[in-house]
Image (spheres, rainbow, N blue to C red):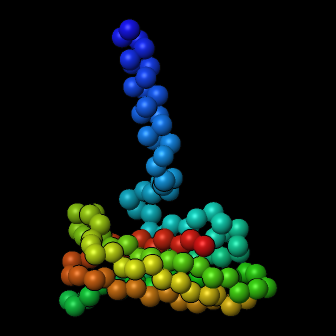
């Protein structure tokens, strides 16, 4: 009986895990996260450059489109405090269309004081 209960419990835990959304593993020092389909669409990007001031932290990143057609990319900047904790409220996701064989610069600003790190997330 005990073995059957343990097997049922493990099966239930596996099913719960299967229902969650897939997450992209991110290291603490990783400042740029791109989904694989962004790379497949011919988009490359520079790591975001963080600028801090007494008023607000800002970041910028250059995106490049190697394709002969425009590509629309969604993005969000995530901000972190000195302890590495994500700052809220989160910025709303934004969208940019990168013209064919061209580049654009993305800009973001922290919504509150105390931002020390930034991460840029790109997806289609």
Question: Measuring 62% from the left and 87% from the top, which residue is drawn there?
Answer: 97
Q: Position of residue 16 (x, y in %)?
A: 43, 40
Frontmost residue, 7 versus 121:
7
Q: Residue furthest top?
A: 1
Quarter of the image for residue 109 reads bottom left
Frontmost residue, 35 versus 14:
14
Whether residue 7 is situated above or below residue 71 in the rendered picture: above
Left or right side of 112 for 60: right
Quarter of the image for residue 101 reads bottom right
Question: Measuring 66% from the left and 76% from the top, which residue is drawn there?
Answer: 43
Q: Position of residue 102 (x, y in %)?
A: 68, 90
Q: Is residue 46 visible?
A: no
Whether residue 121 is situated above or below residue 100 in the rendered picture: above
Q: Is residue 26 visible?
A: yes
Q: Quadrant of the C terminus?
A: bottom right
Frontmost residue, 64 versus 122:
122
Whether residue 38 is situated above or below residue 97 in the rendered picture: above
Q: Position of residue 57 (x, y in %)?
A: 30, 84
Q: Residue furthest right?
A: 68
Left or right side of 81 for 105: right
């Amino acid at each position: 009986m005990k073995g059957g209960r343990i097997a049922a419990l493990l099966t239930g835990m596996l099913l719960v895990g299967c229902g969650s959304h897939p997450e992209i593993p991110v290291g603490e020092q990783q400042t740029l996260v791109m989904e694989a389909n962004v790379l497949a669409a011919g988009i490359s990007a520079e790591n975001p450059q963080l600028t801090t001031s007494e008023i607000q932290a800002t970041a910028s990143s250059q995106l490049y489109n190697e394709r002969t057609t425009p590509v629309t990319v969604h993005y969000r900047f995530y901000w972190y405090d000195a302890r590495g904790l994500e700052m809220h409220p989160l910025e709303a996701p934004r969208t940019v269309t990168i013209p064919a064989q061209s580049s654009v610069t993305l800009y973001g600003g922290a919504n509150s004081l105390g931002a020390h790190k930034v991460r840029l997330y790109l997806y289609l």
